[in-house]
Amino acid sequence: MEIIQQCPNCNSQGEIKMSTERLILETKLVKELNRVIKKLNDEVDILTKQKVFLQSKLREKGDKNDKDKTDNVASVGEEIRI
């Protein structure tokens, strides 16, 4: 609960003073949110690395298939020449 009090050090109309309990709760919430954010960032890093790995494997497989097709075309071409 927020309490509005007259500021004893100045002539302001009022000052919002947060209770100690609220500050403790907000501190705990911030720490928990930071923990969750770190965990999610770690998961994003892992998924990014997996994506790069899988893309490289897919490229390797594509390159191998292209080489196999080229070899087959060359073989057919050689047979035709004979």
Image (cartoon, helix red, strand yellow):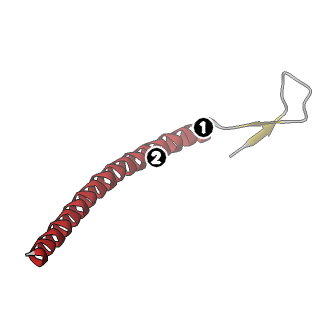
Q: Is residue 28 left or right of residue 2?
A: left
Question: Disc number at residue 38?
Answer: none
| Quarter of the rendering occupied by the C terminus | bottom left
Q: Residue at x 18, y 72 (%)?
A: 73
Q: For residue 51, which quarter of the picture?
A: bottom left
Q: Amino acid at mark 1?
A: Leu
Horizontal and vertical percent position of residue 48: 36, 51
Percent across and percent down for residue 75 are 11, 71
Q: Residue 2: x, y in percent?
A: 72, 44
42 horizontally vs 21: left or right: left
Q: Nearer the viewer, residue 51 or 31?
A: 51
Residue for point 49% across, 46% down: 33
Query: Disc 2 designates what residue?
Result: 37
Depth check: 66 or 28 in front? 66
Query: Please, is residue 3 above or below residue 82 in the view?
Result: above
Which percent across, then down, holds residue 41? Answer: 42, 46
Q: Secondary structure at mark 2?
A: helix
- On residue 23, which mark appears? 1
Asked whether, in this view, residue 67 is left or right of residue 45, the answer is left
Q: Looking at this rendering, what residue extends furthest in the bottom direction? A: 80
Kind of residue at badge 2: Ile
Residue 40 versus residue 67 in the image, above or below: above
Q: Residue drawn 23% across and 65% down? A: 66
